[in-house]
Image (spheres, rainbow, N blue to C red):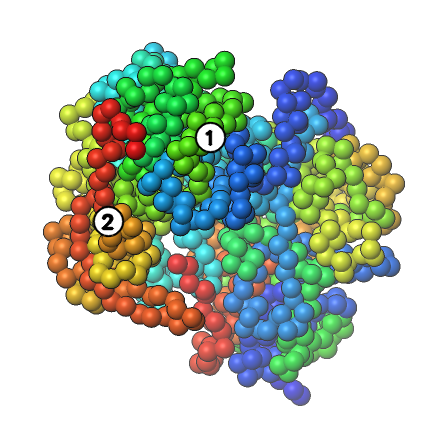
């Protein structure tokens, strides 16, 4: 046969799906998206200090990173959590599915409750941590730092369940601080006083409903609100109007990050590396190695990574431990190396600060066992404090302490106090 | 008569790298090049006034930065500029772009599949892990597994240790990666045709295999393990075209005292009592030396330049059976304006990246089917770039040079040599494809150079026009490249070495074969290699 003739490869289809796909081509012009609250954030952004949170333009700070922290601890702080990854998981088998893929016992999570959980790959390495909201007997929302759709979908084979990514469709807002309850009550969310820690309920808002949970990332009295993206601005305005007399302020991540550290909470890919991102095999972590061992319930039905996790426990194959440290002095030890007896390198500080609430120099650190586990004496951190183009090298004693670094009664008080 | 310390046959990038390192070690080195210019397959040529063509290789990533620094190539004009992603056009009037920004990349994939969009991180992690395993091997001589010399044992141990350092899961993945097809590999991560096609293309470029052929997953890895200034996996343009690489090498070589003779084709290597003693040029001139290094591919070197009687029969048979099959062609086009693609917004960064029209693995495989039948692909796979969108030196302002790498093109058409009519038909299949996505494309063409395997072999000397000087399949890699027992740049003829891409670690304008060969030669001469940087650490 002679050279084959060419068949015309361009097929014209007037498919609606194709048109929809083509309609969103232009995203390349906006590398950092605004969240549904962006108009309000932009109006308040006096510092114009932004960072990239999962492809969104998120504020480091809005007006003053130091004072924004005090808004959390003294008044009520609004923090936009819309960029957080959200999955809707729904169906008759939703409970069984989530019980299978996450560490904690989902059969014990009642509708109207939230729990903090984590999930692992087959080898028991942590893929991510996050919060699981049980919105109804058959409907859940899973919120996390990283993205897991292929893993969730693959794991869902055999379960009658729908997994749908809803990050863009659902706006999220954290309202945290001593006056946060009063703000919600004054905003007219009747019954919000009934919410205990980790409770959630739906409240009417602007012809739709907002899900309010008594949860947060600050260790303080606080709530998280989820609302359809197109009602985000009216929710913001409602809260700000109600909170005006109670000191409500919008804040950026720097302030929130301080509050979470005082609360002893960890951040994925800051305090540990998630399994789907770990290029180096020794960076993988089992739950027991990052302080999440409390989530493991060996008596519950089979869950992902169970065998490997239990085997690691039984054979003492756990190699790391995540601990809270209290460090002498007041110089933050961010990313400092941790030593035993001042010379043997045993770990790394992943987050550190001077805590205004505890009046202590605190840190989270990952140590190589037995250090931090059975050997907790004679630990030191080497702090390189850059001062006017010179490192002041400090070797400071570190003490392993329990987390959280601060415990506020108002976080759990029932009914919540006005402030 | 003068006897050079070394004669390097062929002034391609590996020959020049080799010559540079030998010259800098104090040897008196002569490079003989059959063309009137140096460069081999890394050339920039002004084939029509005002337009410079990268007329063979066209993008740069694999060239080792250690070599660039050792040989002071920036001082001699080499600059590599990262380009901006790329796209696969789809037949429904859309495209799938690759953006450098991680989140834009994810959103782009999500236009086609939310699942695939979120699968990319795991894919990238797994591929990166494999690259990190292989990268340190590039600048080391592969061990001879049959030898018990301490050095070979040491290298084997190094390999073994690296392998043993992997988890059981990673070990399995590594073995699969080296042997499976890119199509099967991608099926484990993605579900969308165009997304799979987008990645599969790196698994077929330069190889006479289809995306469904075992071994193509490794070819993808080979294309991913380069870097542009530490940005691993990135590809870029050499400013001034790929000839900038060899121009800088030639200048560096001359600056260190080396000699280049162009227009000096080698007819054969002089062998006396099993030892290379010089070369005979096409005109009959004999040039003597203490050792000969061949930058030509292993077939050309041992089937054309060395008399058969000088070679052991097993070696000869293996060289004859070495797979170095012609599979690609190249069309270089001068354009009087930037082509427009109605599917692609005018401000898209894709114009500054690589463009493709094959939107499914199925279509790639069909294109390969034509090759198997001895025809060029009716619906070819193109890797098309317009370097002048980033490099102002290659065409007058507003005008452009376009490079189209084309697959598949068989070494012979229906068993017969390529004719000029075949060549024109091949070109037409390419232009027709582009014109379907870019109306008015033909009218912008000022000049065009069409290179089938026939032209590439005739000019560059690559057997069958194979761009890698031999397939990158597992049976021809590491200690089996080019043939078992001769993976350490030496040959059965004393004093005759190989330094081309036929040797470990293979092709892609990497420079590593030339460098590694120089290290082996200097070792044989008991000379210092302190001027050669070891491979950058992978941490």
Give residue A358's mark: 2
Q: Earlier in the sequence, mark 2 or mark 1?
A: 1
Q: Which residue is located at x 66 percent, y 26 percent?
A: A23
* Residue A418: % across, % down: 30, 29
Assess disc 2: are there few (<14), some (14-19) or many (≥20) residues with their C-alpha within 10 Å of its C-alpha. few
Rendered view: A385 above or below A302: below
Q: Chain of mark 1?
A: A
Q: Is residue A169 visible?
A: no
* Residue B348: % across, % down: 69, 41
Q: Secondary structure at mark 1?
A: helix
Q: Which residue is located at x 34 percent, y 36 percent?
A: A177
Q: Which residue, given by chain and number where applicable, does mark 1 sit on?
A: A240
Q: Chain of mark 2?
A: A
* Residue A211: % across, % down: 39, 21
Give residue B250's mark: none
Rendered view: A80 above or below B313: above
Outermost residue toward the bottom in this view = B1
Give the mark toward the camera: 2 or 1: 1
Q: Secondary structure at mark 2?
A: loop
Question: Quadrant of the rendered structure where residue A137 is?
Answer: top left
Assess disc 1: are there few (<14), some (14-19) or many (≥20) residues with their C-alpha within 10 Å of its C-alpha. many
In the image, is B423 to the left or to the right of B518? Answer: right
Q: Tell which of A28 and B49 is nearer to you.
A: A28
Q: Tell which of A248 and B200 is nearer to you.
A: A248
Query: Do callouts 2 and 1 mark residues in contact (Cβ within 8 Å)?
Result: no
Q: Which residue is located at x 31 percent, y 53 percent?
A: A353
Question: Quadrant of the rendered structure where residue A252 is?
Answer: top left
Q: Tell which of B145 and A187 is nearer to you.
A: A187
């Amino acid at each position: 046969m002679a050279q084959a003739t060419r068949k015309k490869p361009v097929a014209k289809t007037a498919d609606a799906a194709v048109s929809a796909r083509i309609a969103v081509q232009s995203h390349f012009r906006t590398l950092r998206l605004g969240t549904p609250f962006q108009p309000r954030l932009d109006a308040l952004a006096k510092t114009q200090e932004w960072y990239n949170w999962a492809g969104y333009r998120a504020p480091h700070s809005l007006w003053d990173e130091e004072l924004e922290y005090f808004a959390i601890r003294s008044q009520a702080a609004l923090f936009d959590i819309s960029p957080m990854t959200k999955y809707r998981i729904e169906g008759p088998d939703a409970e069984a599915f989530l019980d299978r893929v996450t560490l904690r016992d989902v059969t014990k999570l009642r509708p109207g409750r939230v729990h903090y959980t984590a999930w692992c790959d087959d080898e028991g390495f942590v893929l991510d941590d996050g919060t699981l909201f049980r919105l109804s007997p058959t409907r859940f929302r899973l919120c996390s730092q990283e993205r897991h759709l292929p893993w969730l979908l693959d794991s869902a084979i055999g379960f009658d369940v729908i997994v749908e990514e809803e990050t863009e469709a659902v706006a999220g807002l954290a309202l945290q601080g001593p006056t946060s309850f009063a703000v919600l009550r004054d905003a007219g969310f009747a019954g919000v006083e009934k919410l205990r820690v980790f409770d959630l309920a739906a409240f009417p808002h602007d012809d739709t409903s907002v899900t309010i949970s008594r949860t947060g990332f600050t260790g303080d009295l606080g709530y998280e609100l989820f609302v359809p993206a197109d009602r985000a601005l009216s929710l913001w305005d409602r809260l700000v109007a109600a909170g005006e007399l109670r000191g409500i302020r919008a804040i950026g991540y720097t302030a929130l990050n301080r509050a979470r550290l005082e609360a002893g909470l960890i951040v994925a890919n800051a305090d540990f590396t998630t399994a789907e991102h770990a290029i180096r095999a020794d960076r993988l972590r089992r739950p027991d190695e990052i302080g999440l061992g409390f989530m493991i319930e060996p008596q519950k039905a089979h869950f992902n990574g169970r065998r490997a996790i239990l085997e690691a426990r039984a054979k003492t194959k756990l190699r790391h431990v995540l601990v809270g440290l209290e460090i002498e002095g007041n110089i933050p030890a961010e990313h400092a190396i941790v030593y035993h007896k001042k010379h043997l390198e045993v770990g790394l500080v992943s987050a550190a600060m001077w805590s205004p609430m505890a009046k202590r120099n605190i840190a989270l650190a990952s140590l190589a066992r037995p250090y931090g586990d059975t050997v907790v004496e004679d630990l030191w951190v080497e702090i390189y404090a850059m001062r006017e183009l010179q490192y002041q090298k400090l070797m400071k004693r570190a003490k392993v302490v329990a987390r959280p670094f601060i415990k506020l009664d108002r976080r759990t008080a029932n009914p919540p106090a006005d402030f | 008569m003068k006897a050079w310390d070394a004669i390097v046959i062929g002034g391609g990038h590996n020959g020049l790298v080799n010559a540079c390192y030998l010259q800098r070690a104090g040897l008196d080195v002569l490079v003989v090049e059959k063309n009137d210019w140096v460069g081999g397959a890394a050339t920039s040529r002004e084939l029509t006034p005002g337009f410079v063509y990268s007329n063979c290789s066209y993008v740069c990533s694999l060239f080792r930065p250690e070599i660039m620094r050792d040989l002071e190539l920036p001082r001699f004009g080499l600059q590599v500029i990262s380009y901006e992603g790329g796209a696969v056009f789809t037949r429904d009037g859309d495209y799938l772009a690759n953006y450098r920004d991680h989140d834009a990349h994810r959103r782009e994939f999500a236009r086609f599949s939310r699942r695939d969009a979120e699968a990319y991180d795991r894919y990238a992690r797994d591929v990166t892990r494999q690259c990190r395993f292989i990268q340190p091997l590039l600048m080391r001589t592969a061990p001879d597994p049959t030898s018990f010399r301490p050095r070979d044992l040491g290298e084997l141990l190094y390999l073994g240790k690296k392998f043993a350092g992997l988890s059981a899961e990673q070990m399995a993945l590594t073995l699969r990666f080296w042997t499976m097809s890119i199509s099967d590999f991608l099926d484990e991560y993605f579900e969308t045709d165009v997304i799979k096609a987008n990645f599969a293309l790196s698994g077929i470029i330069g190889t006479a295999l289809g995306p469904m052929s075992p071994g193509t997953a490794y070819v993808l890895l080979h294309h991913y393990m380069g870097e542009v200034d530490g940005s691993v996996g990135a590809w870029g343009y050499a400013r001034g075209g790929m000839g900038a690489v060899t121009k800088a090498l030639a200048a560096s070589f001359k600056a260190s005292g080396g000699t280049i003779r162009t227009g000096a084709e080698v007819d054969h290597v002089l062998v006396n009592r099993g030892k290379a003693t010089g070369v005979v040029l096409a005109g009959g001139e004999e040039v003597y030396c203490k050792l000969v290094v061949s930058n030509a591919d292993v077939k050309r070197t041992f089937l054309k330049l060395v008399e058969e009687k000088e070679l052991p029969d097993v070696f000869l048979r293996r060289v004859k059976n070495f797979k170095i099959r012609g599979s690609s062609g190249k069309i270089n086009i001068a354009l009087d304006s930037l082509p427009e693609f109605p599917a692609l917004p005018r401000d898209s960064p894709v114009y500054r990246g690589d463009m493709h029209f094959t939107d499914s693995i199925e279509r790639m495989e069909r294109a390969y089917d034509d090759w198997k039948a001895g025809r060029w692909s009716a619906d070819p796979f193109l890797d098309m770039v317009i370097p002048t969108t980033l490099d102002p030196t290659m065409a007058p302002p507003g005008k452009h040079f376009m490079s189209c790498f084309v697959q598949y093109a068989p070494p012979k058409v229906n068993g017969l040599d390529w004719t000029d009519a075949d060549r024109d038909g091949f070109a037409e299949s390419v232009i027709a494809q582009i014109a379907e996505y870019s109306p008015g494309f033909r009218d912008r063409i000022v000049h065009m150079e069409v290179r089938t395997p026939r032209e590439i072999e005739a000019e560059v000397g690559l057997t069958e026009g194979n761009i890698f000087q031999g397939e990158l399949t597992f049976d021809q890699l590491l200690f089996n490249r080019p043939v078992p027992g001769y993976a350490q740049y030496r040959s059965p003829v004393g004093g005759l070495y190989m330094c081309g891409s036929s040797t470990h670690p293979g092709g892609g304008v990497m420079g590593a074969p030339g460098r590694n060969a120089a290290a082996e030669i200097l070792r044989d001469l008991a000379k210092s290699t302190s001027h050669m940087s070891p491979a950058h650490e992978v941490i």
